Image: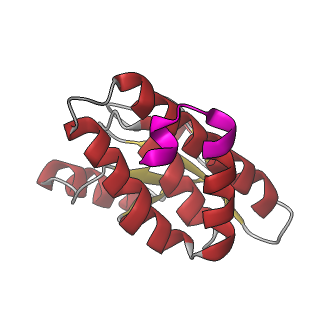
């Protein structure tokens, strides 16, 4: 939090990079980045600017990591947020998936209704930020029955 309060994007990026070298991605996302993001939202003394700066640095680091992971063998997939507005969290999940052997392309805007028919030969990974609703489970099953490769991502 002290690095965020200094409002120095270069120092923030450097800290994110050093943490990325020291700790596994799941630990960083679950035990560092998500709690810090939640604290920023709850802290009325912290402006949205600090939160936005943190999210921007996280997205930048995640995008660079996705690029690096494409140099290794992997499976192609498209990641989309299904009724979730948390763009930074979407990029963190893309980073997490890339370390599991996926070459992730991220749809940057949230999708209200995924359309797997637009990507008939590709693997789609959908993320909702929580357990799927009954309706979402029904749609996932329906798409699978129609032969579409749609995977629900729950970290």
Residue 143, percent from left and from top: 38, 53
Task: Give the camera-side residue of 8 and 16.
Answer: 8
72 with respect to 144 (left or right) = right
Q: Residue at x 56, y 34 (%)?
A: 56
Question: Looking at this view, is 60 or 101 the one in front?
Answer: 60
Report the quarter where the C terminus lies: bottom left
Q: Which residues are magenta?
A: 1-12
Residue 123 placement: quadrant: bottom right
> Magenta region's main secondary structure?
helix
Which percent across, then down, holds residue 67?
78, 52
Between residues 86 and 8, which one lies in front from this camera angle?
8
Indicate how the structure is coloured in the image. Answer: secondary structure
The reply to whether residue 110 is visible in this rendering is no
**Residue 69: in sight, yes or no?**
yes
Q: Position of residue 19 (x, y in %)?
A: 61, 65
Look at the picture and state if 124 lies above or below 4.
Answer: below
Give the total number of marks visible in the rendering: 0
Residue at (52, 35) in percent of width and height: 6
Residue 72 versus residue 12 in the image, above or below: below
Which residue sits at x=20%, y=30%?
Answer: 44
Task: Give the side of residue 88 with respect to residue 132, left or right.
Answer: right
Residue in view at x 83 percent, y 70 percent: 72
Q: Is residue 115 magenta?
A: no
Q: Position of residue 13 (x, y in %)?
A: 66, 45
**Residue at the extreme left of the image, as rendered:** 134
4 drawn magenta:
yes
């Amino acid at each position: 939090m002290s690095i965020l309060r200094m409002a120095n994007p270069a120092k923030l990026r450097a800290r994110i990079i050093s943490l990325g070298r020291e700790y596994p991605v799941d630990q960083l996302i679950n035990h560092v980045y998500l709690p810090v993001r939640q604290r920023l939202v709850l802290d009325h003394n912290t402006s949205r600017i600090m939160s936005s700066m943190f999210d921007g640095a996280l997205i930048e680091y995640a995008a660079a990591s996705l690029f690096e992971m494409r140099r290794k063998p992997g499976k192609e997939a498209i990641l989309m947020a299904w009724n979730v507005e948390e763009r930074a969290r979407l990029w963190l999940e893309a980073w997490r998936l890339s370390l599991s052997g996926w070459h992730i392309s991220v749809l940057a805007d949230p999708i209200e209704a995924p359309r797997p028919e637009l990507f008939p030969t590709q693997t789609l990974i959908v993320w909702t930020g929580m357990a799927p609703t009954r309706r979402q489970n029904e749609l996932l099953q329906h798409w699978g029955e129609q032969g579409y490769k749609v995977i629900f991502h729950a970290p």
